[in-house]
Image (cartoon, grey):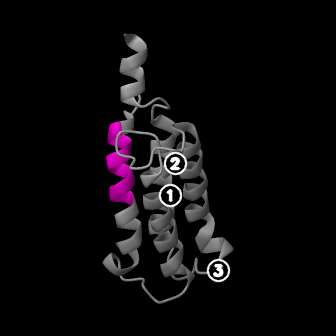
């Protein structure tokens, strides 16, 4: 079973907020890349979610497949950021865990919004 785009949208906004607060919630907000990598990626998730053509998009210009590719790319960047940006000796588990969750949801989500699917069925 695929994740409906409406559910994915709810996860997008929750994930964006979680990423922006994660360094403070888990106590690794040291002001360096370990802090700002998830904050920047979280802000990006919220921004392109607002622009996505799905039930919870506001502007609805970004096609759902492109959104899912951006999710996957952001997830991989988050997962490798501790090693690429050199903070893996301080913290890495939250970056990898949240990135893996985001990658999994991108892989399991429908590419056609529910309202398009209903319109095509008529």
Per the rendering, the mark at residue 99 is: 1
92 in magenta: no
Residue denoted by label 3: 86
Front-most of 91 and 69?
A: 69
What residue lies at 35% left-to-right and 65% top-to-bottom?
17
Q: In which quarter of the image is the N terminus?
A: top left
In this rendering, the label closer to the viewer, 3 or 2: 2
Q: How crowded is mark 3: few (under 14 residues within 10 Å), some or many (20 or more)?
A: few
Residue at left offset 45%, top offset 31%? 110
Q: In which quarter of the image is the C terminus?
A: top left
**Residue 106: x, y in percent?**
50, 43
Q: Does the CB distance between marks 3 and 1 fall below 8 Å? A: no
Q: Does residue 11 show up magenta in the picture?
A: yes
Q: How far apart are marks 3 and 2 (CA)?
A: 22 Å
Q: Indicate left or right for 80 with 22 as reference.
A: right
Residue 72 visible in the picture: yes
Q: What element carries label 1?
A: helix
Residue 1 appears in view: no
Q: Look at the magenta stretch and give its main secondary structure.
A: helix
In the rendered structure, which segment of residues is drawn in magenta?
6-15
Residue at image mark 2: 103
Q: What element carries label 2?
A: helix
Mark 1–mark 2 distance (CA, rounded to whole Å): 6 Å
How would you rate the neighbour count of disc 1 (Cα within 10 Å): few for under 14, some for 14-19, many for 20 or more?
many
Image height of 67 relative to 29, above or below: above
């Amino acid at each position: 079973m695929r994740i409906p785009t409406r559910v994915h949208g709810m996860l997008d906004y929750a994930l964006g907020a979680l990423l922006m607060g994660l360094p403070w919630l888990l106590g690794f907000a040291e002001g360096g890349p370990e802090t700002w990598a998830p904050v920047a990626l979280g802000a990006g998730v919220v921004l392109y979610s607002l622009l996505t053509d799905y039930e919870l998009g506001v502007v609805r210009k970004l096609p759902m497949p492109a959104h899912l590719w951006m999710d996957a790319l952001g997830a991989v960047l988050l997962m490798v950021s501790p090693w690429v940006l050199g903070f893996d000796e301080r913290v890495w588990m939250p970056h990898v865990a949240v990135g893996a969750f985001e990658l999994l949801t991108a892989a399991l989500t429908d590419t056609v919004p529910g309202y398009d699917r209903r319109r095509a069925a008529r």
